[in-house]
Amino acid sequence: MKSPLDQQDWDELKAAAVEVMRRAYAPYSHYPVGAAALVDDGRLVTGCNVENAAYGVVLCAECGLVSQLHASGGGRLTHFVCVNGDGEVIMPCGRCRQLLFEHGGRDLLVWTVSGVKPMSEVLPDAFGPDDLTSLAGAGTEGAR
């Protein structure tokens, strides 16, 4: 498991989420969201929600964060926080929890509404890349 941050470090991560939340484009819901995370090489990545008149094409803050992760060199997320327009910590939706699991794994530490928890508790029994690998192997054996 990743080393825990002290509260000052978590507060700095949250401040980065609040800062990027102020750049969110949320003219329809009026619910700006900001997200910030640390990467295993020490980088900070952020994202904010970007809405669209065709509601289904909304980009979540977590999507922007993961895009920045890969655009800036890839790696694995180690620590994550998400905030609303009042700067309060909020929980990522189920879709975004899956996205975070994909790019941080079971040990990703998430500041939730009930404290810091590993992703294994935020999204228990998650389906991930390892499941696809085991399925691909099973499919190959069954074809013989």
Image (cartoon, rainbow, N blue to C red):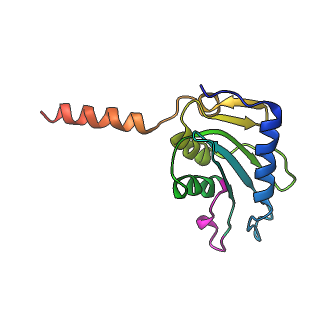
Q: Residue furthest left?
A: 144
In the foreground, 142 or 110: 110
Residue 61: % across, % down: 67, 56
Q: Is residue 7 left or right of residue 109?
A: right
- Magenta stretch contains residue 95: no
Q: At x 56% / y 39%, what residue is drawn?
A: 104
Range shown magenta: 52-61
Residue 24 position by quadrant: bottom right
Residue 44: where, in percent of width, then height? 66, 48
Name above or below for residue 118 compared with residue 25. above
Depth order, front residue of 12/111: 12
Q: Residue 55 lies in magenta, yes or no?
A: yes
On screen, residue 69 versus residue 117, left or right, reads: left
Q: Position of residue 103 (x, y in %)?
A: 53, 43
134 to the left or right of 123:
left
Front-lying residue, 75 or 144:
75
What residue is shown at x 75% (from left), y 58% (from top)? 20
Quadrant location of the C terminus in the rendered image: top left
The image quadrant where one finds the N terminus is top right
- Judging depth in this view, the residue of 94 and 34 nearest the camera is 34
Magenta segment, principal secondary structure? loop
Residue plotted at (85% across, 50% down): 87
Q: How many marks?
A: 0
Kindly identify the residue that appears in the image at 65 percent across and 57 percent down. Answer: 60
x, y (%) of residue 17? 76, 51
Q: Residue furthest bottom?
A: 53
Q: Quarter of the image holding residue 79?
A: top right
Say whether residue 139 is left or right of residue 78. Answer: left
